[in-house]
């Protein structure tokens, strides 16, 4: 198992954002414990575009979920910025996710009864911003993904690529430091996939966001600044 | 967008289902209110002052057994009695309405009855003409309106209880009593038609005060104890309550129907809400991932369920209130019901039921969403 240490990142003047130490995740299936992750240690620098690859069941999505605060480890610690996400209770974790993590899913997961604008606005309803500030931020996020002219469209009126771009706008509208993407191009054609990957790379390179993406596609993986391969719950490369 | 707007859009995302849910609550609560109103109308005794002063004297053996006319002299001398009149139920069928006549006809002493039924208001001229002519009758205003009767009109009744018919003319109209439907005519007219049998159906008397009534009834009973026609005297209110006690099983039946209606409604609403939430499990997991907490998701589900139930209550209970307020229930129910009043208590009950439905039907889905992790929720989508 290899890892890039905090010290080596510091020596490169890169600020680390994710610190993972001895992380394990066990699932209980009947009387048997199945290890989804086994003693994983990993540091991720701010602004990195990390790609997690590996066969199905290798633990890449589990690792992504733990970093994003939607799953909990069985052992070990996962610190994002200065917060040990495993120690937060449900309510604190929800607040933390709202402020620090943007999610992009394979199946877009937009709310079908809301317009593109309203879907992007959704996370901002929890922030206490007034309507005009929310409008400003939503418009900026939609313009950033090239959908400023589709604000009033419902998800069913958009193509798959456009839906995924709305999902990216929703992920970055709260300006979180971390964007997690679980196979974001899995349901897209080649052209749309390229558009989405370009946006994610720009978010990392130009906006300084830390992007962690799970994918099976080597072409998509090539957009990352670093690729990590998982097998049987361990990082192998 | 506001959170309220978000909840509204979710509630109306499947418009047909939302409409059917609202209608199921509305129709059930409409039925609930209707049953409650019917029960109230059937079981509510008159509560005016006259009913606590009036005393009904009937044959101890049975209500249908007559009493000797000679008892009048004894009853009117009993201390505490202000007035007394014969009161004989005729039970005839009104010509033109032979199938079912919804109003009663009573033979009375026209002079004495005025001091017994003190709440009835009659025009003096009409009353005087009625007293003067034994073939005339006084008609309750509700019945007069229903049959469009005018002074001088003939009212013919076919006897079902007595072996004679009545051929009366309308002298005038009365109003102001709890039931302005009855037709009053002369006891003397009935006596003549029956060949002067020397009997009456009952006696109606008036006590000097409600406090005297209990003592007076005891005195009347005592006056005829061990006679050939023993009597049972009771206040009109007690008499009505005795009648109402015969409805006991109806009350249980209506109560049971109401319970079944509410319980079925609960099952339907819970099922609908569960279905609506199950379809949205993945979206709720996404909302959790975006930072919405359990209590906020519970709030969404509760608000949606509560909103639909309350809308149903507004339509159902409000609709019943509006309908029964403007409906001529006497005409519709063939005179069985005098009024069909939806009381504030019934409206309160209907809205309380709707509120509880909204809350109970949200509990299951909300609990299910709360205990499901984001990852489990997201897995349902792929």
Image (spheres, coloured by chain):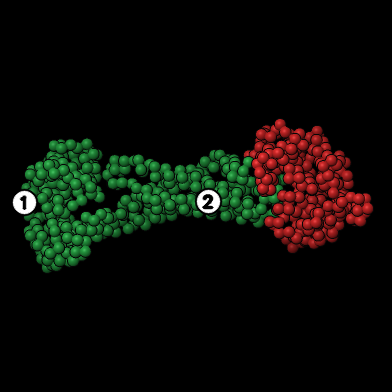
User: Which residue is tagged 1?
Assistant: B196
Tag 1 subunit: B
The residue lying at 75 percent from left, 35 percent from top is A143
User: Which residue is tagged 2?
Assistant: B358
Camera-side mark, 2 or 1: 2
Per the rendering, the colour in which chain A appears is red
The residue lying at 19 percent from left, 48 percent from top is B120
Q: Position of residue B308 (x, y in %)?
A: 52, 46
The residue lying at 46 percent from left, 50 percent from top is B351
Q: Position of residue B341 (x, y in %)?
A: 34, 47
User: Is residue B287 at all visible to an observer of this figure?
Assistant: no
Q: Is residue A201 left or right of residue B56?
A: right
- In which quadrant of the rendered view does residue A6 lie? bottom right
The residue lying at 70 percent from left, 50 percent from top is B291
Residue nearest the observer in this picture, A134 or B155: A134
- What whole-number distance in Å separates the C-alpha atoms at marks 2 and 1? 68 Å
Q: Provide the secondary structure element on which disc 1 rests.
A: loop
* Marks 2 and 1 in Cβ contact (< 8 Å): no
Whether A165 is drawn above or below A9: the answer is above
User: Is residue B347 at all visible to an observer of this figure?
Assistant: yes
Q: Is residue A154 left or right of residue B103?
A: right
Q: Same chain, marks 2 and 1?
A: yes
Q: Provide the secondary structure element on which disc 2 rests.
A: helix
Per the rendering, the colour in which chain B appears is green
Tag 2 subunit: B
Q: Position of residue B128 (x, y in %)?
A: 10, 44
Instruction: Give neighbour class at mark 2: few <14, some 14-19, many 20+ (Cα, 10 Å).
Output: many
């Amino acid at each position: 198992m290899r890892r890039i240490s905090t010290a080596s990142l510091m020596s490169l003047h890169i600020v680390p954002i994710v610190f993972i130490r001895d992380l394990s995740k066990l699932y209980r299936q009947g009387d048997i414990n199945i290890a989804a992750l086994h003693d994983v240690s990993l540091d991720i620098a701010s602004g990195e575009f990390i790609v997690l690859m590996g066969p199905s069941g290798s633990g890449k999505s589990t690792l992504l979920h733990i970093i994003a605060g939607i799953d909990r480890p069985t052992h070990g610690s996962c610190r994002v910025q200065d917060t040990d996400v495993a120690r937060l209770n449900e309510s604190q974790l929800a607040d933390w996710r709202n402020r620090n993590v943007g999610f992009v899913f394979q199946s877009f997961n937009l709310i079908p009864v809301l317009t593109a604008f309203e879907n992007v606005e959704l996370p901002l309803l929890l922030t206490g911003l007034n309507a005009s500030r929310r409008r400003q931020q939503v418009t900026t996020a939609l313009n950033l993904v090239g959908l400023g002219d589709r604000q009033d469209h419902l998800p069913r009126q958009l193509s798959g690529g456009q839906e995924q771009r709305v999902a990216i706008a929703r992920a970055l509208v709260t300006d979180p430091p971390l964007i997690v993407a679980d196979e974001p191009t899995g349901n897209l054609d080649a052209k749309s996939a390229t558009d989405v990957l370009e946006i994610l790379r720009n978010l990392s390179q130009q906006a300084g966001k830390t992007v962690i993406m799970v994918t099976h596609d080597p072409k998509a993986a090539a957009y990352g600044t670093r690729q990590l391969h998982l097998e049987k719950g361990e990082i192998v490369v | 967008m506001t959170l309220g707007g978000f909840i509204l859009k979710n509630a109306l995302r499947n418009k047909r289902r939302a409409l059917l849910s609202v209608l199921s609550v509305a129709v059930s609560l409409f039925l609930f209110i209707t049953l409650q109103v019917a029960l109230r109308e059937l079981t509510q005794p008159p509560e005016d002052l006259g009913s606590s002063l009036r005393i009904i004297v009937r044959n101890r053996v049975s209500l249908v057994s007559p009493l000797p006319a000679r008892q009048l002299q004894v009853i009117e001398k009993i201390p505490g009695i202000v007035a007394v009149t014969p009161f004989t139920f005729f039970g005839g069928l009104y010509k033109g309405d032979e199938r079912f006549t919804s109003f009663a006809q009573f033979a009375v002493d026209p002079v004495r009855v005025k001091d017994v039924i003190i709440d009835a208001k009659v025009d003096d001229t009409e009353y005087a003409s009625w007293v003067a002519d034994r073939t005339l009758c006084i008609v309750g205003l509700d019945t007069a309106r229903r049959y469009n009767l005018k002074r001088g009109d003939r009212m013919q009744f076919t006897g079902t209880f007595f072996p004679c018919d009545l051929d009366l003319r309308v002298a005038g109209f009365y109003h102001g009593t709890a039931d302005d439907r009855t037709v009053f005519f002369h006891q003397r007219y009935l006596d003549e038609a029956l060949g002067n049998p020397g009997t009456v159906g009952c006696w109606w008397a008036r006590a000097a005060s409600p406090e005297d009534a209990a003592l007076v009834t005891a005195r009347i009973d005592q006056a005829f104890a061990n006679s050939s026609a023993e009597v049972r005297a009771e206040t009109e209110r007690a008499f009505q309550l005795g009648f109402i006690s015969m409805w006991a099983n109806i009350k249980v039946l209506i109560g049971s129907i109401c319970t079944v209606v509410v319980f079925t409604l609960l099952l339907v609403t819970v099922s609908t809400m569960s279905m609506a939430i199950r379809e949205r499990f993945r979206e709720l997991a996404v909302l959790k991932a975006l930072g919405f907490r359990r209590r906020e998701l519970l709030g969404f589900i509760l608000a949606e369920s509560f909103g639909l139930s309350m809308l149903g209550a507004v339509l159902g209970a409000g609709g019943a209130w509006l309908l029964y307020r403007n409906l001529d229930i006497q005409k519709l129910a063939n005179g069985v019901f005098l009024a069909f009043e939806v009381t504030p208590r019934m409206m309160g009950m209907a809205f309380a039921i709707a509120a509880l439905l909204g809350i109970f039907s949200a509990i299951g889905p909300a609990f299910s969403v709360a205990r499901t992790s984001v990852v489990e929720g997201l897995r349902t989508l792929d």
